[in-house]
Image (spheres, rainbow, N blue to C red):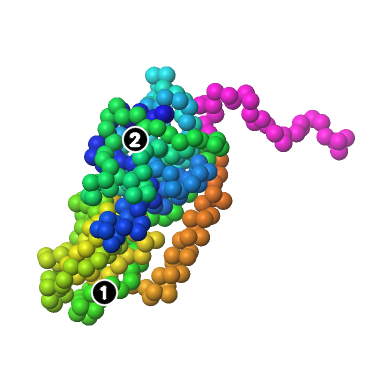
Amino acid sequence: MGLIVLASSAGVTLQDEGRPGWLAQGLSRGGAADPVALAEGAALLGQSTGLAVVELANVPARFRTTKTLRIALTGAPFRATLRESGEDRPLTWNTSHALPPGAELSLSPAEGGFAYLAPAGGIEAPLVLGARSAHLAAGIGRALKAEEELALGPDPGGPVDMVLEPLPRFGGGEVRVVESLQTSAFPPEQMERFRRTTFRRDARGNRMGVRLNPENGMGFEAPGGLSILSEIVQPGDIQITGDGTPYVLLCECQTTGGYPRIATVLPCDLPRVAQAPPGAALSFRFVSRAEGREAMADHARALASLRDSLRPRLRDPAAMADLLSYNLIGGVVSAHHHEDAP
């Protein structure tokens, strides 16, 4: 085993890379809402991105270790506290840590978003359609429960106290999109307004999708859009509902829909939407398909280079029980003895 859940809620689930290839059977891919965080955790621990981790969807949770284990904390920054021998100390984010047996780890949201607790070796759970991830909208898996013990896979070992700079995707910003099947159904003046509009991420949202509120309060409408027959939809599609509100579909969205789609977010930019906290500003920029392919290639290269960006964490000497084992004065020479001194 290795990790006991002490406190949980409906937003705490096991997630991995999801289940591609089941769209025709009515099942969207699912998996982590922020797959970049999976790659960052894997880089910090030196393991595969396909292993299962704990996802916290803007909710707190607490855990207890039953053995020494390595973990990585990635995704939206949460407040992380480790309680050991009756004392609390904060843990840094985007970092790998070594936890002793019997320690308690508390995670709580700071600004919102999806956070990830990745244990070395991954979390062992039954495979369902090739994945361990929960897909609550489809009735696959469930949220983690208090007093549940999570079995961990074997840890081949590796360094801890490593840090990386996360790929930029927090706090909103510009999101690249391509035209969708119904983009041409929207009048040119509405498309121009869509390009110019700044949207605010609504507090309403989940793993299925997020609602966006135009700052000017004006919605969008495709003439005859509500008569569109239901067809395949996918994560990243921006649907315009009957009241003119845009919704960006996320990893656990439905597989068909009849609302007109004004655009589709590039997969490499979708984590920026998923990780935008409530109230964050988002805007959309149309790119060509060639530009989209280039952006995806750049994103793949950035993910592949994550391990090259690791650096040791600067530790507080006051918290280093093994301080005397460190050479703190390496390279220092005596001011009174030098071979060139007279």
Percent of width and height locating residue 159: 56, 37
Quadrant the N terminus occupies: top left
Write down the residue under mark 2.
107
**Which residue appears farthest toward the bottom when viewing the image?**
188
Q: Quadrant of residue 259?
A: bottom left
Q: Quadrant of residue 119?
A: top left
Percent of width and height locating residue 160: 53, 36
Task: For mark 2, give the secondary structure.
Answer: strand
**Is 337 in the magenta?**
yes
Q: Residue at x 42, y 29 (%)?
A: 2
**Is 259 in the magenta?**
no
Write down the residue under mark 1.
181
**Which residue appears farthest toward the top when viewing the image?**
85
In the image, is residue 195 above or below residue 203?
Answer: below
In front of the other: label 2 or label 1?
1
In the image, is residue 288 above or below residue 215?
Answer: below
In the image, is residue 233 above or below residue 277?
Answer: below
Most frequent secondary structure within the magenta stretch: loop
Percent of width and height locating residue 318: 52, 26
Task: Report whether 324 appears left or right of 127.
Answer: right
The residue carrying pointer 2 sits among few (fewer than 14), some (14 to 19) or many (20 or more) residues within 10 Å by Cα, namely: many
Q: CA distance from mark 2 to mark 1?
A: 41 Å
Q: Which residues are magenta?
A: 315-342
Q: Quadrant of residue 194?
A: bottom left
In the image, is residue 269 above or below residue 45?
Answer: below
Residue 238 visible in image? no
> Front-most of 255 and 264?
255
Q: Residue at x 22, y 80 (%)?
A: 188
Q: Amino acid at mark 1?
A: Leu
Task: For mark 1, give the secondary structure.
Answer: loop
